[in-house]
Amino acid sequence: MRRLKISSLLVAVFLAGCQSATSVDMAQPIESSIEVIAHDGTMSDVISHAGILSPEVALTFNGLADNETMQRLLNVLEQFDMKATFFLEGMRVAQEPELVKDILARGHEVENGTLTFPDMTDLNYEETFKEVLLANQVFEEQLGYTPRYVRSRSGDATDNMRLATKALNMGGVVEASINPSDRNMQSAQDIIDYIDRFLNSGSIIHLNTYINPAIIDVIPLLAQLAKEKGYTMTTLNGVVEKQYQVKSLEEIEGFDAIQVNLDYENAKPNIFYRKITAKKEIALTFDDWASEERIKEVLDVLAKYNIKSTFFLIGKGVERNPQLARLILEQGHEVASHSYNHLDVTTMTPEDLQQDVMKAHRALTHALQQSPLLYFRPTQGVIDDESAKVIAATGVKAIAMYDIASFDWNLDYTAQDIYNRVLSKAAPGKVVVMHILDDTKTVEALPLIIEQLQSEGYSFAKMSTWIEEDSNEKVN
């Protein structure tokens, strides 16, 4: 690999800053230049969220506050048995190695916060490389290891940071999925309220040690929030190392099973409403998307009664939290498309509709790391002959409808209202649509519905079973 030898102003700054660090051996020969590895255009990953299925969250801090503040912070973290990752500038590590060693001794992680904590957006590649490399060298000298990750003062990843970390064989540049910007001097409660809005498994929380004194008071509130929602606060590596393997979309078999195909006039859509059977079976299905808390509540109810269902998910929502779609699949349920943008398909142009169906399929495929069922359920169950043909022409094998609308999306409906509506229409082969939406009474109504149907002798089927049986009957 070609190397460029460049004299470094940063080295002078680094050495000047280390003059007061008694642990630095100033008798060592001093280089007036460093080698900057020329990048080949390849960038490292940006890590802002970990794709994990377990309820764990990475707690991270930027910077090193004064010794008194750091001891208070470390003590309160210890009190609530929380581990965190600290991104520290190399200069401070060189100046206060004993404090940094105390952080490590308490079970926390320390990673590269660049050498001098500059605004990285103002630096070119060579300057960026030196900021990262020199900080790594301080870590090696003072702590005996090379950091794996780097983060800027602002928490934003620049292209030059990604190029430099790749050239240095580091694990990547860390951003955050939750950054409450505590530099704006919010109260501890304001910071917690912000975190609460965005918290989910694999989140990376970004706080600062040296800006807002309220940060100490955040920790007990964060511990309470984590306890209420069932999360464990841990280190960055604690969540990153548990990520499931993610292939690129093009590497996944079936990613292109749905395509735009405007030659749809002769398409023969398979529209499925219910199973014609005398067997006491019902299919419970779920539409839409919601917060992690709501999705897990629905999954917990289904697990309690050992019921497997079919979930029709909105592609745009799945893209925001792909690990939740993967969790649904991991728990034995099946996943199909409920469009990408959740629009009325009968009002869309053929091209826009097919683009939406294809985009949803690819969002689900990437989230699941495998192709979902090639089924499609239109928004609000609205379909007409032309839109059905347009959808079928893309490669969709079944337009999966329903014949019992629970109306659980209606916020005015009580759990009893939802129960009454479903049970009044229940019969063998019926397909029930419910919703994974926040603020509804679905979770309260679901056990009532399941227990009553089971008491009447019903079992529960996944839609694929019925659709495949019907397809085989037609062929035969």
Image (spheres, rainbow, N blue to C red):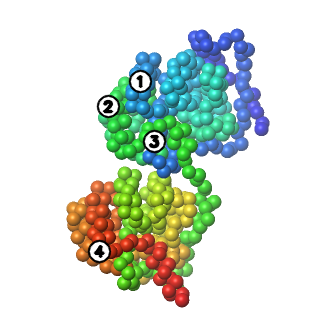
Q: Nearer the viewer, residue 5 or 86?
A: 86
Q: Is 447 situated above or below 233?
A: below
Mark 2 vs mark 3: give the one in front.
3
> Disc 4 marks which residue?
456
How packed is label 2: few (under 14 Cα within 10 Å), some, or many (20 or more)? some
Task: Please give the residue where the numbered disc 1 appears in the rendered image.
Answer: 75
Q: Are marks 2 and 4 in contact (CB under 8 Å)?
A: no
Q: CA distance from mark 2 to mark 1?
A: 20 Å
> Which is in the foreground here, disc 2 or disc 4?
4
Estimate the x, y position of residue 368 in percent, counting from the top left.
52, 59
Q: Count numbered badges in the picture.
A: 4
Amino acid carrying mark 4 in the image: Glu
Query: In the structure shown, which secondary structural element does the residue marked by tag 1 occupy?
Result: helix
Q: Tell me where residue 300 sits by quadrant.
A: bottom left
The disc placed on residue 187 is 2
Rendered position, 340 above or below 60:
below
Q: Are marks 4 and 3 in contact (CB under 8 Å)?
A: no
Residue with the mark numbered 3: 57
Which of discs 2 and 1 lies nearer the camera? The answer is 1
Image quarter in which the C terminus is found: bottom right
